[in-house]
Image (cartoon, rainbow, N blue to C red):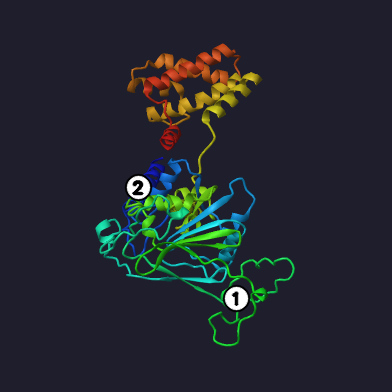
Amino acid sequence: MRQKIGIIVTVLLLLGILIAINAASYEGEDERQDTELAPNRSTYHSGATGTRALYDFLSESGYPVMRWREVPAQLMAETSQRVQTLVIIGHTALPFEEDEIKSLLLWVERGGRLVLVDRDTFLSGSGGWEVAPKFGEFPSFAVNPGDVAEMTENVKSIQPVQPTLLTQNVESVMPSRFAATLDFTRTNLRPEPTTGPAQPLPENDDFADEPTPTPDHVGPPAAAPSQTTPLSPAPVVHLADSRGPLLIDYPRGNGRIVILSDPYIFSNGGISLKDNLQLAINLLTTTKGLIAFDEYHQGRGQTRNALIGYFSGTPVLPILGQLVALILVILWTNSRRFARPLPLNQIDRRSSLEFVASMAELQQQARAFDLAIENVYSRTRRVLARYAGMEYNSPRAEVAERVAARSSLEARPLEVLMRQCEEAINGAPVTERQSIQLVKRLRDVERDLGLRMRARDARQAIQKT
């Protein structure tokens, strides 16, 4: 038991050390420094570069919002929560794969509304127009995104270019000094006969790869208008500064794409400046329906177990892994031998009381009272002779006199007891009651002389203790 207590105490001590190490090395996600160079635009993030303030405002204001944590292909699935507006903010933690971009554009062509808020864009031209960002000042680690004065240094608020649905109730917007501008140009057109019903554009078509000459190409006159696909409406500019547009939108198929080139307007650090919040509401709520913020590419997709995702970023998972490793080590060491084999302890499972009880029952059933007296008297005579310092076969009278001389017993009663036992052993008639009385008197003599404990009994008693 002491060995088990030592093992238990050791295991508990190791667990305490592991927990202390994990607790000391744990660093919460929100404790990491927020920088504009490596921002976290997730709606779960409450830092200066996050967008949790905007999401919570929309949710508490009653707008239908959600966090989209699945791949873009699931946007076209027939579910009860059909997304109408998808919002992608900032440079995401996971890049957009080519097949994901195709699925996203297909969803837009089928009537979806995509809102991109970033200084860069992963989309190419659409409907004959190419959109490309022009970067301004590049952020550094020294810039504090939570300092409004530092983020808007030498920046003036800008006013809407024209009254549109996206700029209603917006007097001015305050971007950051790192805001990019958007440049859009016409791309190549593809000839297409106009006879018959109009042919829809193929899904996921990108006109940037078309080899046909542009309208600005110097050469033979272009084909007649009836021989080419009409150019899609140009992107609408809603906000612009002296460098160029900051907010545009343009159609793609049955849907629209909205691009805002400064995520600082949506971030927790800039949403409260000027009419930035009103602009965000206009961009997201102009079209009725469910508004989804892309969290899949922010690294919070539902590609793993929900329970593991709940404890992600905490020391719980490392502690559980270390506990499993510790249990495996204990199980492995218990099944291994680290020294020479030792024989098992041989325990005498025979009880002397069981032997005596069985022999007594046999003698009682056979009425062999003389045999019972002989078993007890033989041992008593041997110890009496040893006590008197005489041989075992010495006359009983001499043995009795010598014992009486060395003890407080009387010689005559002891000699009579020895004679009665010997006569019973030699065949004299004796009853059960008389045999019990003789054995009791023999035990009393042993007790008075202090001879009740035999050497074998003493050894067995020591082994048991």
Please, what is the three-letter code of the amino acid marked with disc 2? Gly
The answer to whether residue 26 of the structure is visible from this angle is no
Q: Locate residue 324, reporting x and y percent.
A: 47, 52
208 in relation to 302, above or below: below
Residue at the spot of label 2: 16
Query: Quick one: 435 or 423, which is closer to the camera?
Result: 435
Describe residue 327's horizontal placement relative to residue 127 as left or right. Answer: left
For the point 42% across and 28% down, which residue is it?
453
Q: Locate residue 34, reporting x and y percent.
A: 32, 58
* Label 1 vs 2, first from the N-terminus: 2
Describe residue 458's horizontal placement relative to residue 378 as left or right. Answer: left
8 in relation to 34, above or below: above
Residue 189 — which label?
1
Query: Which quadrant, please, contains the N terminus?
Result: top left
Q: In the current view of this chain or complex, which residue is farthest to the bottom?
A: 219
**Distance between the Cα atoms at labels 1 and 2?**
70 Å
268 in relation to 407, above or below: below
